[in-house]
Amino acid sequence: MASPAQPVDIGRFARDVRAGDRGVLSRAITLIESKRADHRRSAAALMQALIEATGHAVRVGITGSPGVGKSTTIDALGSMLTKQGHKVAVLAVDPSSRRTGGSILADKTRMARLATDANAFIRPSPASGTLGGVAAKTRETMLLCEAAGYDVVLVETVGVGQSEIAVADMTDFFLLLMLPGAGDELQGLKKGVVELADMIAVNKADGDNVGRAKAAAAEYRAALHILSPRSPNWSPPVVTYSALTGDGIGELWARVLDHREKLNASGELAARRGEQQVKWMWAMLEERLFEPLRSDRSLRTALPKIEAEVAAGRVAPATAAEQIADMLER
Ligand SMILES: Nc1nc2c(ncn2[C@@H]2O[C@H](COP(=O)(O)OP(=O)(O)OP(=O)(O)O)[C@@H](O)[C@H]2O)c(=O)[nH]1
Ligand SMILES: [Mg+2]
């Protein structure tokens, strides 16, 4: 992997990112992913230098169970959009992934068209770490891509743990993909995720599946009725499509744009983004404050013992918290 820029001339680096060169963009992402303290300072300065160049992209989060067709959908949707003249960045939040075997990398075969598309940029999930850390890096990567001229950002997440919430918190539109075959699927619906969804799209509506996909869509529509919508300006639609044939992909995107128009007009989009930004500030601060708990060797060895004492009821939680705080301040 290319090493992050040496002593960094931030102004120049920022200009180069804005010029849209992919190699420079990759180096900038490597810099923000670095854990070194001096890199971290440079990264923060770079983000600050680029802040005015960010924010213009349509940000879409995509989730759904393994095999539902997220990658195939991103390939179909992304290549439709680059044909329309858009520049599309594809990112992922997968706290379980490893740099060398990240699912999105393996997935490049499922994104065959985008992988060779000059107007698409695919970046795998940052290497495994805490969800907070992985998500923060992905969010900054999204901003770097925007500064580099990408006007559509698609963020894929596997449905593990809280990653959907993190992705919903960095995007404007959260898309939940489902499979045909309503009955069982409906039971598998994670309520928290459905409540975040701005649209449910039933994939694989092709061949023999068309009827089942429509039936599934009808069931989801009924299910959505009893949930209170995330936005007063938008009722999440349920659509069917096929990532394989491309049928319905255009309509799917039209809904995303419709949502954008409505939330823009009402001011909700700007408000949502503002709230997200503040949330991210706190998330990053929290991540940073907790960092010594993970990296400081004496703390790392002491913590399990303290935990054991607390679990056994020998040390009061309040005493232990004091103890840890003291160690952090030393
Ligand atoms: N018939 C049909 N098959 C599809 C469609 N979309 C995806 N598939 C197939 O479903 C399988 C899984 O697709 P992926 O795009 O890899 O799914 P994913 O959600 O990214 O999977 P993970 O990354 O493993 O979570 C592949 O064999 C695809 O060819 C579709 O619209 N119709
Ligand atoms: Mg995939």
Image (cartoon, rainbow, N blue to C red):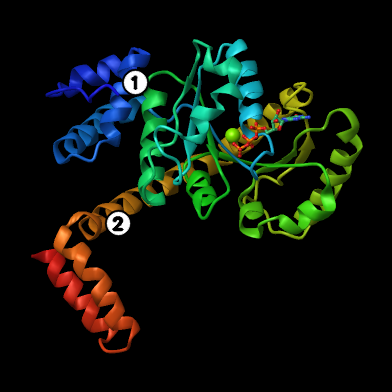
Three-letter amino acid code at the position of disc 1: Leu
Q: Amino acid at mark 2?
A: Glu
Relative to 205, is 311 above or below? Answer: below
Does the rendering let one see residue 58?
A: no
On the image, the x and y values in percent for residue 199 come to 69, 42
Frontmost residue, 214 versus 84: 214
Q: Secondary structure at mark 1?
A: helix
Q: Residue at x 23, y 60 (%)?
A: 293
Quarter of the figure that contains the N terminus: top left
Residue 239 locus on image (x, y percent)? 78, 37
Residue holding disc 1: 25
Query: How many numbered marks, from 0 up?
Result: 2
Q: Residues within 10 Å of mark 1 (few under 14, many from 20)?
A: many
Q: Earlier in the sequence, mark 2 or mark 1?
A: 1
Residue 116 at what x, y percent from top left? 53, 12
Label 2 and label 1: CA atoms lie apart by 27 Å
In the image, what residue occupies the spot 20% across and 65% down? Answer: 301
- Ligand number 2: quarter of image: top right
